[in-house]
Image (cartoon, helix red, strand yellow):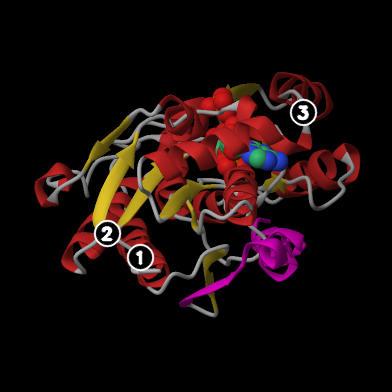
Amino acid sequence: MDRKVKTIGILSSGGDAPGMNAVIRAVARGAISKGIRVMGIHHGYTGLLNGDVFEMNLRTVSDILHRGGTVLYTARCPEFKTDEGVQKGVDMCRSLGMDGLVVVGGDGSFRGARDLSIKGVPCIGVPGTIDNDIASSEYTVGFDTAVNTVMQMVDRLRDTSQSHDRCSVVEVMGRRCGDLALHAGIACGATCILVPEVPFDMERDVIDKMKKTLNTGKHHFIIMVAEGVGKDVTEIAKEIEMATGVESRATVLGHVQRGGSPSARDRIVGSSMGYHAVELLEQGIGNRVVVMQQGKVIDLDILEALQQERVFDTKLYQVANDISI
Ligand code: ADP
Ligand code: F6P
C-alpha cells in the first residue's frame, strides 16, 4: 500500500488566539512546499463534521500573518465529545482523502485530536490559546499578545486611577490558569495579583498590604485578579474601599484580551510550531502535540502530554509580590 501522505487538513478549535493565523500559514505553505495538498476546515470540529472544507493554496494564506483571530474561524463542538461524533469525523477525513490533520487549540481540542488519532487519523495538536494553560508546553501561541494587550489596557487604567487616587481592580481571562494575571500583573506593577494557584486571604494579602503601602506614600493601586479565582471583582472593589477608604473601581477586561495583531513572538512561535506539525505528518507520524520546552519546539505523545500537571511559576509570583510594595 502506498502510505505517502498526500493530503492533510487544518482546523482551529476552542477560543481563538492571536497567532493562530501564523500557524495556519506555516502549515499551508510548509505542506505545499513539500508537495502535500492542504484542506482548510472552517469552524473547528463542527466544520469537519459538516464537510465545511476547501483546498488551500499559497495565496489563500497571504496577508494573514499580522491579523488576530483565525481566518479558519473556530467553534466549540459538543458533538465531538461523543464517540459517534469522533467516528463521523474519521469517516469525513476518509471521504475527503485526508491522511492527517493539524488541530490548533487548547487541551480540549487536543482531546478531540487524540480521539481521532486513536481511530486511525494521524493528528498533531498545536497549542493556541491566550491562557498559557497547557501543562506540557512552556508557551501557547497567543499568550504574549494577550499579556501585552492587558498591559496596554491597564496602563490606561493606571492613568485615571493615579489621577483620582483610586484603586483599580482588574479581572483578566485565563480560565483556571493564573499565568495571564501573573505576567500582566508584573508588567503593570500591580500591588496584588490574585490567581487560582495560590490561596489568598483578602485581609492579609490585599487589605493589609494596601494599608502598609498607603503608609509609605502610595496613593493609587492596581489589583490584578485572574478570572479563575472565581470572585466578583465588583465585590472585591467594594471590600477594598470599605476597609482602606481608597475609592475603588472594578474593570472586567473581557474579550478585548483575545483580539489584536499578534506580537512578533506569537508570529515566530506560531510559524515554527505549524511547520513542525507538517514535518511530523509528512513522516506519517500522528498522535503528537507540538510544544515548547526549554525554549525549543519539540513534540510529545498526546496522551502523555494531556496527563502532565501544570506547574505554576511560584518564583515569579514571589518576585511580583516582593517588588510591589
Ligand atoms: P480548548 O481547546 O481551548 O481547551 P475547549 O475545551 O472548549 O477549548 O475544546 C474545544 C473543542 O474540542 C470542544 O468544543 C470539542 O469539540 C473538543 N473537545 C473538548 N473536549 C473533548 C473531549 N474530551 N473529547 C473529544 N473532543 C473534545
Ligand atoms: O480559553 C480562552 C478564553 O478566552 C478563556 O480565557 C476564557 O475563560 C474563555 O476562553 C472565554 O470563552 P468564550 O469566548 O466562550 O466567552
Q: CA distance from mark 1 to mark 3?
A: 51 Å
State yes or no: Cβ of the residue under disc 2 lies below 8 Å from any atom of ligand 1: no
Give yes or no for residue 102 being in the magenta stretch.
Answer: no
Q: Quadrant of the N terminus?
A: bottom left
Badge 2, how many Cα within 10 Å: few under 14, some, many 20+? many
Nearest to the eye among marks 1 and 2: give it: 1
Nearest to the eye among marks 1 and 3: give it: 1
Point 71% across, 67% down: residue = 304
Marks 1/2 in contact by CB < 8 Å: the verdict is yes
Residue 240 circle label: 3
Residue 61 circle label: none
Nearest to the eye among marks 3 and 2: give it: 2
Residue that carries the numbered disc 2 in the rendered image: 26
SS for dot 1: helix
SS for dot 2: helix
x and y, in percent, of residue 96 in the image: 35, 41
Amino acid type at circle 2 is: Ala
Span highlighted in magenta in the image: 296-325
Q: Residue 159, relative to residue 303: is it above or below? A: above
Quadrant of residue 250 within the rendered picture: top right
Amino acid type at circle 1 is: Val
Residue that carries the numbered disc 1 in the rendered image: 278
Camera-side residue of 51 and 236: 51
Point 19% across, 60% down: residue = 32
- Is residue 49 in view? yes
Q: CA distance from mark 3 to mark 2?
A: 48 Å
